[in-house]
Each structure stands twice: as structure tokens, then as C-alpha cells.
Image (tube, grey):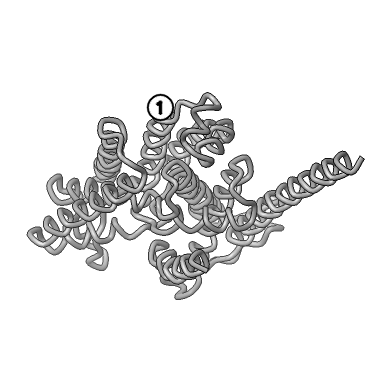
Amino acid sequence: MKYISKEFEFYREHENKKKLKLIFLFSSFIFLFFLFGLSSFMGEIAISPLKVFGGSLTENEKYVFFNIRVVRIISAIFAGASLSLCGAVAQNILKNPMASPFTLGISQGAAFGASFAIIFLGGGTMSSYGEAVSISSYPVTVVFAFIGALSAGFFVFLMAYFKDAAPNTIVLTGVALGSLFQAITMFMQYFTSETKAAATLFWTFGDISKGDYRFVYIILFFFIPIFLFFFFSAAKLNAILWGKDIAKTLGVKVKQFNLISILLISVLTAATTAFLGVIGFIGLISPHLAKIIVGSDNKYFLPMSAILGSIVLLLSDMVSRFILAPAVIPVGIITSFWGIPLLIFLILKGQK
């Protein structure tokens, strides 16, 4: 009887924890929805919710609301979710808390590709209005940024496949590869004109305002199937987290699954950074916060990581828009400002 009682108590405790995790997930989603509304109606041009739902917006207000604010918010939500999902999966399969699209060199690969297009294919120009730097060949720049990011991811993929490198070795290789891409990018900037150098610098600042409906369609095309793949592979990810031998015992083809995972996170990161530039720390910090809230069970960990990535990037974008209004700071600067101290805090907490 005592054994049955303890077993029932364990089951009840497990169910309570499961309910609590679901409550956290639902609450986070509601908070994200609240931020969506808050960000849509706040700005230099105040737009009343009553006018939006009542259909009484002027043509100018319609353009600002639907073509600037809404698309910017949706871009922030799915970019944050994508980068955070990639970081969560990378940390899981590599068993390294420092793994992320940035530390694997994928973001720097995108910056290199974009810089190459701007410098050698005439992507950077000086506009006549206010002598501002602009990206003239935006589609070409995006394509080359995508190729650069995929090249970095493919190199990491080759290391994992042919060398069968240890997880820590893959992360260190990614860091070295990122440094190499960064060095080549700076070398190109040093010998090019001031205009093109400024254009490459402008692109590398992660900026949500670069997102448009094309980006939204493309990121949805990649994000939805990749998220569903990992969500329905939560049991495999959990098994890998428990250990390579245990995973193999449970029938998981560890090497094959890890290779597919690296390929998918490379594609998703490439799609995000190719359009928006380098946005640091989202893919590193958000998964850590998710693990603190719901634990490491990927059934809850992956959705929470995606939602928190969206929340963090959307909040950062709101700060970038309002802190020095009417000037808008690139969101990559904001994420770095709060990301660095938060990362140090998490490292110190982990050591304790």
C-alpha cells in the first residue's frame, strides 16, 4: 500500500508540474499578444485601437499601421522565435550552453556574404537625400548573405559528418570560423571606399526595419516546418540529452539526427540574418531563460524558447524605437546591451 501511495504521489506531482509548465507557456503567449497590441498602437504617430477596429483610419494611418508597424512586429516575432529555436536545438544536440547561431559562425557568414555583395557588386550607394548610405542592390545582398550563412553552416556540417568531431570541438570550430569571416569582412572594409564601408557597417547592425512582407513569407515558409520537425522530435532530443549511448539504445540514429539538425538550423538562421542582419544573443540567452522556467524537457522547452525569443526581440525593438525617439536605434545594439550582462549573470549562476 505504501508503494502504491508513493507511486500515486509521484504521478500527481508529475502531473502538477506538467500543468504548471502549460500555464507558463500560455501566460507567455498571452504576454506576447499583449506586446503585439502595445507595439502596434504606440509610436510617433499615435493610432487609436478604436480607429483600427472601427475602420476609420486615414490612408496615411493605414500605411503606417499595416505596412510599417504590423510587418515590423511580425518580423520581430518570427525572427526572435527562429533564432531562439536554433539556439535551443544547438545547445541540446551539442550539449554546450554556449552554442548558438552566433557562436557557430553562421551569423558572421551572413555578414561576410552581404559585405561581399555590397563591396564587389555595387550594393552600397550614397543617396542624395541627406547624404545617407543605402543598400541599392538589396535582393543581391540578401542572396549573398544567405549563401554566406549557409556556407558557414555547411562547413560545421562537414566537420560533424566527416571528422565526427566532439560537440565542444564543433562549437570551437564555429567560433574560429566566425572570427575568420569577421576578419575577412574587416579586411574588405578597410580597402574599399568610405561609402561601401559604411553600407556594410549599416547592414551588419541587426535591424528589424529591414523586414518586409517578403521576409515574413520567407521566414514563415522555413520556420513552420522546421519548428514542427523539432517539436515532434522532442523525444529524440530528450534521449540525446540523456546521453549518446542511451539514445542509441532507444533507437535514435544520433549522428544522422544531429546532421539534419545542424542543416536545418543553418537554413533557418540564414533566412533570418540574410534579411535583418546580425542580431546577437537572442539565440543564446532565450533558451537559458526557457530552461529556468520550464526545464529541459523539449516538449515544453522548445515552444517556450521560441516564445521567449519573440518576446525578447519584440521588447528590444520597442526600446530601440522609443528610447531616443524619433531616432531609431538598430535592435542588434539593444540586444547586445542587455544580453552581455545577462549572459555573465547566467554563467555566474551556473558556476554556483
Q: Position of residue 257 (x, y in %)?
A: 44, 30
Q: Position of residue 69 (x, y in %)?
A: 52, 55
Q: Position of residue 242 (x, y in %)?
A: 53, 40
Classify the position of the N terminus by image quarter. top right
**Vertical position of residue 33 compared to residue 230: above or below:** below
Residue at image point 45% right, 41% down: 93
The single residue placed furthest to the left in the displayed view is: 191
What residue is shown with label 1?
A: 256
Q: Nearer the viewer, residue 236 or 126?
A: 236
- Whether residue 328 is visible, yes or no, is no
- Whether residue 156 is visible, yes or no, is yes
Q: Nearer the viewer, residue 63 or 151?
A: 151
Q: Position of residue 339 (x, y in %)?
A: 45, 66
Residue at image point 51% right, 32% down: 247
- Which amino acid, mark 1? Gln
Residue at image point 41% right, 55% down: 98
SS at badge 1: helix
Choose top left, top right, bottom left or bottom right for residue 48.
Answer: bottom right
